[in-house]
Amino acid sequence: MAKFATGKKTRPVPKLEPRIVALMFFIGMTLSAAALRLYYLQIIKHHDLSQLADRNRIRIQRMPALRGLVYDVHHRALVDTRPSFDAVMVPEDAPDLGGTVNRLEQLLGEDGAAKRLEDAQEQGRPEFEPVTVEERLNWQQVVTLETHQLELPGVSLQVNPQRHYIYGSLGSHLLGYVGEVTVKDLARLPEYRMGDEIGKFGLERSWEDTLRGDSGGQEIEVDAVGRRLRLLREIPEKPGDSIRMTIDLDLQRVAEEAIGGRAGALVALDPNTGYVLALASHPAFDPNVFAGGITSAQWRDLTTDPAHPLQDRATQGTYPPGSTFKIVDSIAALSDRTLSPQTAYFCPGGMYFGGREYRCWRKQGHGTISVHRAIIESCDVFFYNVGQHLGVDRLAAWAHALGLGQKTGIELDNERSGVIPSSQWKWRRYRERWYPAETLSVAIGQGYVVVTPLQLAELAAEVGNGGTFYQPQFVKEIDSIDGTPVKVFPPIIRSRVHIDPAVLAQVRSGMVGVVNASDGTAHGARLDDVIVAGKTGTAQVIKEAQGVRVKENQGPERYRDHGWFMAFAPVDHPRIAVACIIEHGGHGGSSAGPVVKAVMQEFFMKNPPQGTTPLRQRTDSVRLASTSGHGGPASATHEQLDAQTE
């Protein structure tokens, strides 16, 4: 042991105990580690941590832009944006998230908050992002939420813009609806954020870029429970541009009211521009359900409804055109000279071909008949012969030239093209040859041939305007927030088909008789002061068994025929062309005819024809047209009619 000299004697230096050494070493290491950690946090990570601290106090709140308004052609609002009082929750601000959610649901009397938070977590939304847990709170709920704010950490009241469809289901398939962006949407649209609205269907979807606008933001200071204290900085949002549509609100309303509770569709066009004047599809749906956040139960009800209310029957529904297709037969055969105005066929009520009988709708037959009377009375046997002499391939070529069997180009999603069969089409589709007997079915608009109501409205417009196919458009102009036009959309000509004026005159004469002759198949659609040209159609849903005739309006409704009517007016200078189908409505003249008549009455009440003679003064000429049997008298009658209407 070491000793110290202390003068007289030395004493040994005390030895440190091992445990004291260990304790001192531990304390030294702890202080060193703390010093290093403090240096790391305060010096190295100072900038990052100061930002995190600010985020607990300062938050960036995104402000979605107001979507543009939607107007009808007369600048009457159809869709606007209204304030919605919503309960918004930031999960990380709630120490007891489950308890807070339960208390919120108890106070508001709603039970959807937990489900919405769960959905947000499944979508991978960060805890610091606000989640809208309840929407469209009433005034009592707003007061309750504000009164109990201290009991609901992380919950706040926000006023958000919400899409509002002023007339509910009116025009719903054309206007469409909006919904919250999904994860799939975000993957292809990086400029969107979770919680943003996006067009999902109809005009809202196809014109999303125009209506959306640019979002802004606010930098706000919040307290420990996420309550807003004050605004620090703001970047204003830019509202979307507004859209002025081509449709007329009054015409749209009349069309939907006339269809009523039945399933069907109607399309009204301006034959000189292609502008859509009305587009109705029934059953319809209320887009406001989607704007407010549709529930799983509501979505299930809509998608499983056997009436298919989400289907736009005007552009997505395909149906056999029935006897309306006889207008294509007539134009094709008269143009290719396999038929003349003097050609006559005998109709005894049916026609034997290929070992079986093909019936006419009129059991007792029509007797000897030419094209003029065949159009008026819709004689099947006459057009069996027309189709047989023309051939399916020539018939298909003319149908395609007139716009059938192909998409029209309207800016709506999922438009169907329909089918116009030919020998090549059948070989490509079924690897089978075409049988001549199949042409007979095609000639009366049955068999493989199917079209959409929009295509048939285009056909009526082409017959009326002389063969010009205008692309259907439902947006006339884009306006800025102050109403200044930003862009105007002129008519677009997609194609022209040359039709001999004499052929058109013959076909139009027959179509005039369909509506205005006393025995015409659509006499009930006649107007007093305007000459309407039209054609009815009855499309079989099921084939008749040989020897068995299916009677109209008998048996289960789902097996009854569809009723068609297409028309344009006035016949001398058309201003409106309409096509309507009533599913399982039976005869087109009695089911679809009154709907088209109601629309045309409304149109001409608002747009009275100028320089025309009231129809009741033309009775003699129309009666003469309806009673002529062969080409000579029919042609003379049409010349007389043209002379009066020019």
Image (cartoon, rainbow, N blue to C red):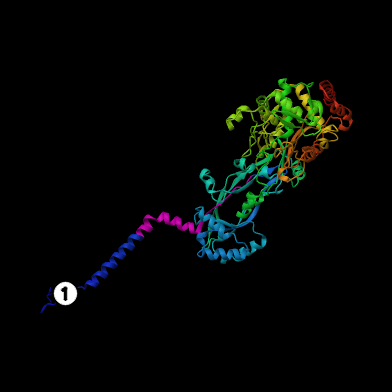
Horizontal and vertical percent for residue 327?
74, 29
Considering only vertical position in the picture, is 305 above or below 537? below
Horizontal and vertical percent for residue 635?
82, 22
Q: Is residue 51 covered in magenta?
A: yes
SS at badge 1: loop
- Residue 318 falls in which quadrant of the image? top right
Q: Quadrant of the C terminus?
A: top right
> Is residue 387 found left or right of 126 in the rendered image?
right
Considering only vertical position in the picture, is 27 above or below 294? below
- Residue 581 falls in which quadrant of the image? top right
492 and 300: which is toward the camera: 300
Whether residue 624 can be seen here? yes
Q: Is residue 250 covered in magenta?
A: no
The residue singled out by tag 1 in the image is 13
Whether residue 152 can be seen here? no
Q: Main secondary structure of the magenta part?
A: helix
